[in-house]
Image: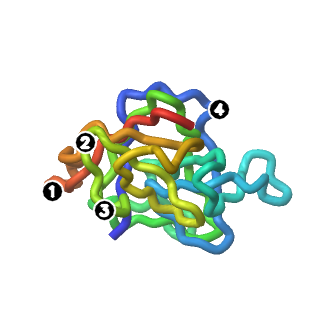
Amino acid sequence: MANVIEIMNEIVNDTDVLSVKSSSDVLDDGYVGKLSGLVNGEMDLYNFAKGQATDPLVIIAGADVYMDSYGNRVGYKDPRKITYPADRPVRAYRPRVGMRFKINTDAISGTPVKGQYVIPQNNNYQLLAATNLISHTSGLALEVEDAEAKIMIGKTLVNATVLRVIRV
């Protein structure tokens, strides 16, 4: 089942919204990775790759309109069934300190706890729950504001976690 992410109460600058793609991996909402340069021949489409926890990272949060492999708009009832195929552009955000978002709890490796943290992993797109930041002294860090939130998907409530960026 794919992930769901919801940006909360955030004014996003145009410079923080990017188009990215991976030439080899299927991408999903909530994935974190690094920009590894512009796609050859493109002026505003970046290569997205697994990074190190200390790299400047971006977060995948796809558009509300989905397209099939032929470029046709597709209606959907459950965004958890949507992933982004390799070589297809998807929207990503540069995280900023104070930015808040809600993500389904399944998208996080481990169990997030209110007041603790979520951090990126080396060479992995998935976020990781952490009790403290002692061993993670630089790079993206997110504080868990609510570990028992919900996201409404159709008529179903799904377990979610509210995260706030405290360091980039």
Q: Secondary structure at mark 2?
A: loop
Q: Do the numbered discs 1 and 4 sit on residues whose CB atoms are within 8 Å?
A: no
The span from disc 1 to disc 4 (Cα, nearest Å) is 34 Å
Q: For mark 4, what is the residue?
A: 15
Disc on the earlier residue, 1 or 3: 3
- Crowd band around label 3 with a 10 angstrom C-alpha radius: few (<14), some (14–19), many (20+): some
Q: Is residue 8 left or right of residue 159?
A: right
Disc on the earlier residue, 4 or 3: 4
Q: Which three-letter amino acid code belongs to the residue tagged 2?
A: Lys
The span from disc 4 to disc 2 (Cα, nearest Å) is 31 Å
- Crowd band around label 4 with a 10 angstrom C-alpha radius: few (<14), some (14–19), many (20+): few
Disc on the earlier residue, 2 or 3: 3
Q: Which three-letter amino acid code belongs to the residue tagged 1?
A: Thr
Q: x and y percent of residue 122 in the render?
A: 57, 62
Q: Which three-letter amino acid code belongs to the residue tagged 3?
A: Asp
Q: For mark 2, what is the residue?
A: 114
Disc number placed over residue 106 in the picture, else none: 3
Check the image and report above or below for 118 versus 3: above
Q: Secondary structure at mark 1?
A: strand
Check the image and report above or below for 129 versus 116: below
Q: x and y percent of residue 167 in the render?
A: 52, 35
Q: Residue at x 29, y 37 (%)?
A: 145
The span from disc 2 to disc 3 (Cα, nearest Å) is 16 Å
Query: Which quadrant holds residue 79?
Result: bottom left
Q: Secondary structure at mark 4?
A: helix
Front label number (2 vs 3): 2
Q: x and y percent of residue 140 in the render?
A: 54, 43
Q: Is residue 133 left or right of residue 57?
A: left
Disc on the earlier residue, 4 or 2: 4
Q: Residue at x 33, y 70 (%)?
A: 1
Q: Which three-letter amino acid code belongs to the residue tagged 4?
A: Thr
Q: For mark 1, what is the residue?
A: 156
